[in-house]
Image: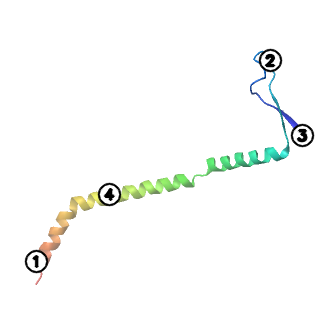
Amino acid sequence: MSQIQGRGRTTSRKSKLPYVFEVDGSSIRPLNNRVKLLERLARDDSGATAVEYSLILGGIAAAIIVIVYVFGDKVNNLYNNTQSRWP
């Protein structure tokens, strides 16, 4: 077992000695795996790409809705006029 000195609370307010924690390799390994997982998640940018694509898709959908709202009646009248003049 190795000893790691930590900077936590001391047993007495007057004492300035830090705690001494005893750890073995088996208790370090899960912590090391969690740190590696957090590092991997911090570097991963696939979620950001999905958000960017969803914002682009939302913008396209909003543009389509505005175009249909603005030009909908005009296009409908154009088709109705064409149909009424068809022999």
Q: Find the distance from the CA under tag 2 to the CA under tag 1.
A: 98 Å
Q: Earlier in the sequence, mark 1 or mark 3?
A: 3
Q: In this figure, which residue is indicated by the disc labeled 1?
A: 84
Q: Residue at x 56, y 55 (%)?
A: 46
Q: Quadrant of residue 85?
A: bottom left
Q: Find the distance from the CA under tag 3 to the CA under tag 2.
A: 26 Å
Count residues near mark 3 (Cα–Cα under 10 Å), then give few for <14, some for 14-19, many for 20+: few
Task: Determine contact: label 1, label 3, CB under 8 Å.
Answer: no
Q: Is residue 56 above or below residue 80?
A: above
Q: Which dot marks residue 1?
A: 3
Name the amino acid, label 2: Ser
Of circles 2 and 1, the one toward us is 2
Q: Earlier in the sequence, mark 2 or mark 4?
A: 2
Of circles 1 and 3, the one toward us is 3
Q: In this figure, which residue is indicated by the disc labeled 4?
A: 63
Q: Earlier in the sequence, mark 4 or mark 1?
A: 4
Count residues near mark 4 (Cα–Cα under 10 Å), then give few for <14, some for 14-19, many for 20+: few
Of circles 3 and 4, the one toward us is 3
Q: Is residue 10 above or below residue 64?
A: above
Q: In this figure, which residue is indicated by the disc labeled 2?
A: 15
